[in-house]
Image (cartoon, helix red, strand yellow):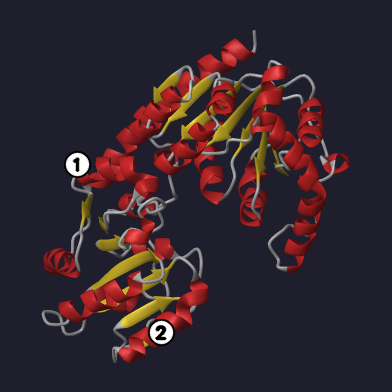
C-alpha cells in the first residue's frame, strides 16, 4: 500500500500542480506563495543553524491557533528553540501572517504536497530536530521519511474518528508501519486513545483537547450595539450552519409568548448565507436586520443577522445565553461541534445540540461544571432560555474554573513535550 501511495502521489503530481494553479483563480490559494507547496526551489529556507528547530504542522486555522500557546510556553523554557509552522489553507496562512509577528523565532511556510521527492527535499533543507503533527494530519511520506532520517515525530491533540480508523484498518500492515513511526501521541479523547493503541502507536497519553489553551483577550465592548442590548432581553445563536437557523427562529417565536420584545441574534458560520437566512425570516414574518460591522441595531428589530467576521466577542461580552451551532442536526454526527471556550470565558451559559464530536471532551467538562448544557429540542432550548432571560446574570465562576483547567492542561502537555524534546536533543 505504501509503495502504491508513493507511485500514486508521483503520478498525480502534475495534475495537483494544475489544480493549485486553478485554485488561484478561485482565490483559494496564496497568489504570492503558492509555489511553496509544489516546487522545492521555493521552500525559502531561513533558519539559524545553531538553534534547535521544531516543526509544527497544523492544517488550518483551528489547529494553528491551538499550538500558539504551546510555542509561547516553550519559548519561555528555552531561548535556543526555533520554530517552523506549516499550514495548508489560505485562511491559515493569512492568520499566521498576523499572529506570528510577535515571535522573532517562528516562521510560516505552506506544507508541500506529500510527494516523496518533495518531502525528502523539504526535510533535508529545513533539517528539523523534532516534528509535531496536529490532530489528524497523517501524511505517510512525511512520517516514514522522518523515521528514516531519525527525526523524532509526534502527533498532538490526536483525533481519529471511527470512520477514519476503519479506513486505516483496510490496509492493516501499512497502517501499523506508519503509526508505529510516531514516538509520542498526545490524544484529545479516550476514543482516539483506543484507536491508536490498535494501530500500534507507542507512548500514548491522554492530555485533553489543547484548544482549552486558547485564551482570547477579554474585551468588554462599549460600542455600536450596546445601548439597545443593555435595555433589551436577547440571546445569541453563534456559528450556525444551514438548517440550524430554522431551529433558532422557531425558538424565538416560542420566546415571544413570554417576552414580547425579545431579540434573537444569529451569527452564521458562513456569512455568504445571510441573504438566505433573511429570506427565511421574511417567510416567518419576523422583523429582521442584517447587521454590518459598524452598524447599530435598529429599534423594533427582533432578528439580527450578523454579516461580519471577527466580531463575535462583542456579542459574547453582553450575552448571558449562547447556542453554539454545528451541533443540532444529525448530519453533523461525525463532524459537529464549534469551539465554546471563548463564549465560556465571557461568562455565557452555553447550549448545544447532541452532535459535538470535535469538542466532545470539552463539552463534557463544561457540562459537568454547569457552564454548558445539552439540548435536543426547540422546547428544551426555549424552557432554559426563559429561565436565563428572567435572571440575566453572567456566570462569574466560569472564568476562574477555565483558568485552573487551562493551567493544569498546559502543565501536563508541556511536561510531555519537554521530555520528548530532551530525548530528541541527545
Other-residue count near label 1 (Cα within 10 Å), few / some / many at <14 / 14–19 / ≥20: few
Can residue 307 be seen? no
Q: Measuring 77% from the left and 47% from the top, which residue is drawn there?
A: 12
The relative height of residue 66 versus residue 413 in the rendered view (above or below) is below
Can residue 264 be seen? yes
Where does the image place residue 178, in percent across and percent down from the top left? 59, 26
Task: For mark 1, give the secondary structure.
Answer: helix
Where does the image place residue 272, in percent across and percent down from the top left? 52, 75
The one of 175 and 320 positioned closer to us in this rendering? 175
Q: Measuring 59% from the left and 26% from the top, which residue is drawn there?
A: 174
The one of 269 and 121 positioned closer to us in this rendering? 121
Q: Measuring 29% from the left and 88% from the top, which residue is drawn there?
A: 284
Q: How many marks?
A: 2
Q: Measuring 37% from the left and 57% from the top, which residue is drawn there?
A: 332
The relative height of residue 128 versus residue 384 in the rendered view (above or below) is above
Where does the image place residue 401, in percent across and percent down from the top left? 26, 39
Where does the image place residue 331, in percent across and percent down from the top left? 37, 60
The relative height of residue 83 versus residue 285 in the rendered view (above or below) is above
Q: CA distance from mark 2 to mark 1?
A: 36 Å
Q: Which mark is residue 216?
A: none
Residue tagged by mark 2? 278
Query: Within the image, what quadrant is residue 420 found in?
Result: top right
The one of 46 and 317 positioned closer to us in this rendering? 46
Residue tagged by mark 1? 368
Q: Earlier in the sequence, mark 2 or mark 1?
A: 2
From the viewer's perspective, is 133 left or right of 297?
A: right
Query: Within the image, what quadrant is residue 102 found in?
Result: top right
Residue farthest to the top? 426
Task: For mark 2, give the secondary structure.
Answer: helix
Amino acid at each position: 500500500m505504501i509503495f502504491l501511495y508513493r507511485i500514486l502521489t508521483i503520478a498525480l503530481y502534475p495534475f495537483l500542480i494544475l489544480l493549485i494553479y486553478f485554485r488561484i483563480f478561485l482565490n483559494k490559494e496564496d497568489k504570492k506563495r503558492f509555489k511553496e507547496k509544489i516546487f522545492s526551489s521555493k521552500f525559502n529556507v531561513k533558519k539559524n543553524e545553531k538553534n534547535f528547530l521544531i516543526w509544527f504542522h497544523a492544517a488550518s486555522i483551528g489547529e494553528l491557533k491551538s499550538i500558539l500557546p504551546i510555542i509561547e510556553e516553550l519559548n519561555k523554557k528555552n531561548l535556543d528553540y526555533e520554530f517552523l509552522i506549516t499550514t495548508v489553507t489560505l485562511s491559515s496562512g493569512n492568520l499566521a501572517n498576523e499572529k506570528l509577528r510577535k515571535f522573532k523565532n517562528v516562521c510560516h511556510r505552506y506544507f508541500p504536497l506529500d510527494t516523496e521527492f518533495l518531502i525528502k527535499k523539504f526535510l533535508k533543507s529545513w533539517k528539523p530536530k523534532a516534528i509535531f503533527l496536529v490532530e489528524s494530519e497523517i501524511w505517510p511520506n512525511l512520517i516514514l521519511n522522518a523515521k528514516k532520517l531519525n527525526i523524532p515525530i509526534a502527533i498532538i491533540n490526536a483525533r481519529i474518528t471511527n470512520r477514519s480508523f476503519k479506513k486505516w484498518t483496510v490496509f492493516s500492515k501499512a497502517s501499523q508501519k506508519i503509526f508505529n513511526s510516531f514516538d509520542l501521541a498526545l490524544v484529545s479523547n479516550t476514543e482516539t486513545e483506543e484507536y491508536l493503541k490498535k494501530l500500534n502507536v507507542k507512548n500514548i497519553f491522554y492530555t485533553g483537547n489543547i484548544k482549552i489553551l486558547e485564551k482570547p483577550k477579554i474585551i468588554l465592548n462599549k460600542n455600536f450595539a450596546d445601548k439597545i442590548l443593555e435595555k433589551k432581553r436577547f440571546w445569541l445563536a453563534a456559528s450556525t450552519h444551514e438548517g440550524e437557523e430554522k431551529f433558532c427562529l422557531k425558538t424565538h417565536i416560542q420566546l415571544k409568548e413570554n417576552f414580547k420584545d425579545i431579540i434573537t441574534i444569529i451569527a452564521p458560520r458562513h456569512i455568504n448565507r445571510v441573504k438566505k437566512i433573511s429570506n427565511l425570516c421574511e417567510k416567518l414574518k419576523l422583523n429582521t436586520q442584517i447587521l454590518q460591522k459598524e452598524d447599530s441595531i435598529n429599534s423594533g428589530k427582533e432578528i439580527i443577522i450578523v454579516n461580519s467576521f471577527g466580531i463575535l466577542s462583542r456579542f459574547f461580552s453582553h450575552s448571558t445565553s449562547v447556542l453554539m451551532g454545528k451541533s443540532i442536526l444529525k448530519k453533523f454526527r461525525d463532524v459537529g461541534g464549534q469551539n465554546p471556550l471563548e463564549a465560556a470565558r465571557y461568562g455565557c451559559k452555553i447550549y448545544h445540540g447532541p452532535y459535538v464530536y470535535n469538542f466532545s471532551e470539552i463539552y463534557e467538562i463544561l457540562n459537568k461544571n454547569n457552564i454548558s448544557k445539552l439540548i435536543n429540542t426547540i422546547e428544551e432550548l426555549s424552557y432554559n432560555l426563559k429561565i436565563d432571560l428572567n435572571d440575566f446574570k453572567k456566570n462569574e465562576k466560569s472564568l476562574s474554573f477555565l483558568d485552573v483547567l487551562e493551567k493544569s492542561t498546559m502543565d501536563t502537555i508541556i511536561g510531555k513535550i519537554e521530555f520528548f524534546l530532551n530525548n530528541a536533543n541527545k
